[in-house]
Image (cartoon, rainbow, N blue to C red):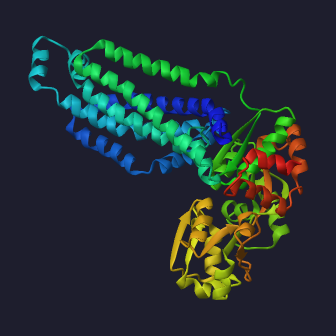
Amino acid sequence: MNPNLAAAFDLLPEYLAWHVLLSASALALGLIISLPLAVAASRSPRLRWPVLAFAGLIQTIPSLALLALFYPLLLVVSALSLSLTGHGFSALGFLPSLLALTLYSMLPILRTATTGILGVDPAVREAADGVGMTACQKLFQVELPLAMPVIMAGVRTAAVWTIGAATLSTPVGQTSLGNYIFAGLQTENWVSVLFGCAASAVLAMTADQLLGLIETGAARRDRRLMIGGAVGLLVGIVIAILPLATFGKPASYVVGAKNFSEQYILAELMADRLERAGATVSRKEDLGSAVAYRALAAGELDVYVDYTGTLWTNVLNRQDNPGRQAVLDGLTTELEKRDGVTVLGSLGFENAYAFAMKADRAKALGIVSLADLAREAPKLTLGTDIEFLSRPEWKAVDAAYGFRFKAQRSFQPTFMYRALSGGEADVISAFSSDGRIAADKLVVLTDPKGALPPYDAVILVSPQRADDPRLLAALKPLVGSIPVSAMQGANYSVDRDTDKASPAEAARGLSK
């Protein structure tokens, strides 16, 4: 069997269990909220429009954005709860995903349930009134049974939407089938991407068919079909989530990672050292920069690697550049003082934002520095990673050099390099520790005005683990131990086109 496929199957029980638990919980909660609202909306024209309009508005928000919006909101609520009661709750992972997907599931249920109840023949209602039924009896014995086929059509739509959208919960720290897709896209492991897509599609089709049995049974007044569909769903959910009961006690440590190859490798490196020290470790990968730091400061993560320039500009909101050591010293002091976060130390290499071009293209245009690039920018297309153009670093470098590019396009980091090689971009915001710079024969443009800060890779430790002897003993030896050449080699082993290594294999290479 293909090694990538074998690895995908090994991860399937955990990923599928969390995906099913999340999707089923969101759909159940959506039903519990939507059905009473639909009944109320069917009774009151005044209520009907705002309820349906709100549900429709939720659908206009991209599901990934909706998931991300719940994280900072829940973080504030958790902090308030902690201050008032002494007990907070986890704002990373399951809860924000559950709430966002619940909202996302509501529109089709609300709309079809309202339509179904309103569509009941008035003569039938009159007959129910004529035999002396109460409003409650009429609802449960007449209106809901007659509306059930229409309602189930909405539930089927909501189920498919929810299962699909649940793959997007990965960036807020929730394990799901989306882990295959996000990690696979970044490392160009297309087996992983296709496996995740196929698993999600099969899950959605299976749920749709079982719900279809209930819908058909409701339309035909056939209880056997309805019971068969319901039992099939229940058994399927129980079997799918059963592996969660076998995972044992919660992990001792949670190691975080952002959404690119180097982060996966460094997370595996730290996790491996902790596991060799006898700890159990879980991984939260594909996190955005802001989410990762907030999660660490809140104790949702125990440790992850970040970069001094990112912390300096995004966390401390500093725009000056006092030099490498001053930035590191300032961060060490300020993060501990402000958030209780410990900067354990630099790993020994820098992964800076660096503008890169094909060597022959740069030579033909006479571009050596960012000042030269500004001169030629109106004829060129800039390619960046997805978040760079919204970051303070871009604002600083743009203000320093006054770029006016012909076009600016954003890509996943892996596709950004592809865009440069394919001509869709003329210059990219590369990363200095990326092995593809040398492999693709790219030149890195100098920054004579020092607009970009240093980006030393540093280990960050949460306030709760600042004095943890096992964690500190396992990870302190990593400080200063990884030269940039070693990191470039490890990154390239994961990112190259053929004979790819997994992040875990690359991490083992670094630890030798």
Instruction: In the rendered view, tell whether residue 400 sits above or below residue 209.
Output: below
Instruction: In the rendered view, tell whether residue 346 sits above or below residue 502.
Output: below
User: Quarter holding the N terminus?
Assistant: top right
Q: Where's residue 448, x and y in %? A: 74, 83
Horizontal arrangement in the rendering, residue 157 relative to residue 506 (left or right): left
Q: Where's residue 309, x and y in %? A: 73, 65
Observer-nearest of 267 and 184: 184
Observer-nearest of 22 and 300: 22
Residue at 43% across / 28% down in the picture? 28
Q: Where's residue 210, x and y in %? A: 39, 24
Note whether residue 290 is visible: yes
Identify the image quadrant of residue 176: top right
Note whether residue 304 is visible: no
Horizontal arrangement in the rendering, residue 146 relative to residue 377 (left or right): left
Identify the image quadrant of residue 133: top left
Observer-nearest of 191 and 321: 191
Q: Where's residue 94, x and y in %? A: 57, 36
Residue at 16% across / 26% down in the picture? 120
Instruction: In the rendered view, tell whether residue 221 sits above or below residue 457.
Output: above
Tell which residue pokes out farthest to the front in this image.
1
Horizontal arrangement in the rendering, residue 107 relative to residue 279 (left or right): left
The number of numbered discs placed on residues in the rendered structure image is 0
Residue at 69% across / 56% down in the picture? 495
